[in-house]
Amino acid sequence: MILHKGETLFRQGETGPLFHLKSGLLKINRVHADGTLTLVNIIVPGETIPHHSLLSPNPYYGTAVALVSCEVEVLSATDWYRELEADHQKCREIALQLQGKLRMMQQRIDQLSEVSPAERLRKLQLWFQSFVPVASLSEVLTQDEIGQFIGLRRETVNRLLRAQSGHKK
């Protein structure tokens, strides 16, 4: 299945199949009870999602939206869990995938713990460039989303992006 930038793969609270991202990037947004929308995760090629349903079914934690064109393989939940029971090697594969995601989250924590906001932004930009060659991070994420991802206010992100492009107030 091909998803184009901005298209939704699944919605928060729904149930359904699992998905393997072959190419592209997805963002996972979560709407909280007060209506606040938060970027909670970025899905990169090679990941099978939703992570919290890899071993047992659960409703989708958030809404998955394509950041760029994506190729996604749809995996039947029934077949997935049946294969999991029959092939314990698959459990090891899932554990390795989750380990990789934990390492990615550790990098994100490192980004958040950087003293300099400019350095946080620079590290996020480098990380994105390793997956998608974009001229500007704001081509794929809003300034609010960038701020949520690296622990900065939108205004700070705006100022840093302007400074990088050479446009100072």
Image (spheres, rainbow, N blue to C red):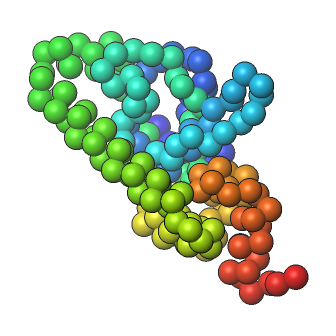
Q: Position of residue 132 (x, y in %)?
A: 49, 63
Q: Nearer the viewer, residue 89 or 156?
A: 156
Q: Is residue 142 above or below residue 62?
A: below
Expressed as whole percent of the image width and height from the top left, the position of residue 24 reads: 47, 52
Kindly indicate the quadrant of the structure image that contains residue 107.
bottom left
Q: The C terminus lies in which quarter of the figure?
A: bottom right
**Residue 161 shows in the view:** yes
User: Closer to the camera, 27 or 35?
Assistant: 35
158 in relation to 165, above or below: above
Q: Which residue lies most toward the right here? A: 169
**Which residue sits at x=63%, y=68%?**
117
Report how many numbered discs are placed on residues in the image: 0
Would residue 69 appear left or right of 94 to someone viewing this image? right
Residue 19 shows up from this direction: no
Report whether 142 appears left or right of 49: right
Q: Please give the name of the residue rendered at 75% of the width and 65% of the height, measured from the top-left corner.
A: 156
| 145 vs 22, nearest the viewer | 145
Q: Position of residue 146 (x, y in %)?
A: 65, 56
Which of the 4 image quarters holds residue 17?
Answer: top left
Tell me the residue at 59%/18% (across/down): 13
Single out the residue that lies furthest toward the front: 115
Compared with 121, 151 (above or below) is above
Q: Using the rendered view, name the quadrant where residue 118 is placed.
A: bottom right
Q: Position of residue 23 (x, y in %)?
A: 42, 51
Residue at image location 23% in from the left, 34% down from the top: 95
Compared to 145, does 114 lie above or below?
A: below
Please tell me which residue lies in front, 2 or 96: 96
